[in-house]
Image (cartoon, rainbow, N blue to C red):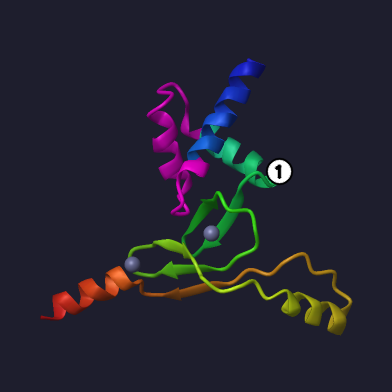
């Protein structure tokens, strides 16, 4: 049983690492199901939680859904309000914001999160085509 648990966790971890598009728990579930037809949705969800808590993957909270990230370094995200796509924002993490808040309040900051909400280039293109 223990061995099966470990194997399932590895499958989930591999599935998250194989995708670079911030998959939802359901998307990971379908990827894992393709490799192990017996695995349940609850097992996949539980393993995602365990992996996120242990820091092996990152958990990204965006409007309406939880997503998972193979990247563990601090970075910001962009969320498309039309298609739900989550992508990495290509700007550096601003350490100095954490330091500023610490200095002003004595609060020990571990990190801050930022999500830019808007419409992705693909959706903008579609919109422009619809308008024609
Ligand atoms: Zn979009
Ligand atoms: Zn990311």
Say which residue label 1 marks.
Answer: 54
Q: Which residues are magenta?
A: 16-42
Which residue does the image show at 63% across and 24% down from the upper left? 6
Q: Name the image quarter holding residue 35.
A: top left
Report x, y in % for residue 36.
Answer: 43, 24
Q: Is residue 47 above or below residue 101?
A: above
- Would you say residue 132 sits in the magenta stretch? no
Which residue does the image show at 56% across and 74% down from the upper left? 91
**Is 35 situated left or right of 108 in this image?**
left
Q: Residues within 10 Å of mark 1 (few under 14, many from 20)?
A: few
Q: Residue furthest left?
A: 132
Q: Which secondary structure lies at badge 1?
A: helix
Report x, y in % for residue 117.
Answer: 46, 74
Q: Residue furthest right?
A: 106
**Is 125 situated left or right of 55 in this image?**
left
Taking depth in this image into account, of 33 and 95 the one nearest to the observer is: 95
Q: Is mark 1 within 8 Å of ligand 2?
A: no
Q: Is residue 110 above or below residue 97?
A: above
Report x, y in % for residue 92.
Answer: 61, 72
Q: Quadrant of the C terminus?
A: bottom left
Which residue does the image show at 51% across and 63% down from the upper left? 62
**Is 85 situated left or right of 77 in this image?**
left
Report x, y in % for residue 94.
Answer: 68, 76
Which residue does the image show at 47% across and 54% down from the upper left? 22
**Is 24 situated left or right of 73 in this image?**
left
Q: Residue furthest top?
A: 1
Q: Is residue 80 above or below residue 12?
A: below
Quadrant hosting ligand 1: bottom left
Q: Quadrant of the N terminus?
A: top right
- Would you say residue 25 sits in the magenta stretch? yes
Taking depth in this image into account, of 26 and 51 the one nearest to the observer is: 51
């Amino acid at each position: 049983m223990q061995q099966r648990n470990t194997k399932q966790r590895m499958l989930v971890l591999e599935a998250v690492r194989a995708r670079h598009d911030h998959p939802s728990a359901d998307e990971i579930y379908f990827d894992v199901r393709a490799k192990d037809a017996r695995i349940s949705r609850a097992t996949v969800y539980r393993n995602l939680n365990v992996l996120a808590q242990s820091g092996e993957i990152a958990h990204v909270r965006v409007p309406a859904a939880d997503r998972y990230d193979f990247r563990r370094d601090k970075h910001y995200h962009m969320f498309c309000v039309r298609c739900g796509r989550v992508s990495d924002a290509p700007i550096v993490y601003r350490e100095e914001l954490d330091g500023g808040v610490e200095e002003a309040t004595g609060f020990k900051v571990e990190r801050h999160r930022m999500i830019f909400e808007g419409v992705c280039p693909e959706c903008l293109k579609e919109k422009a085509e619809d308008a024609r």
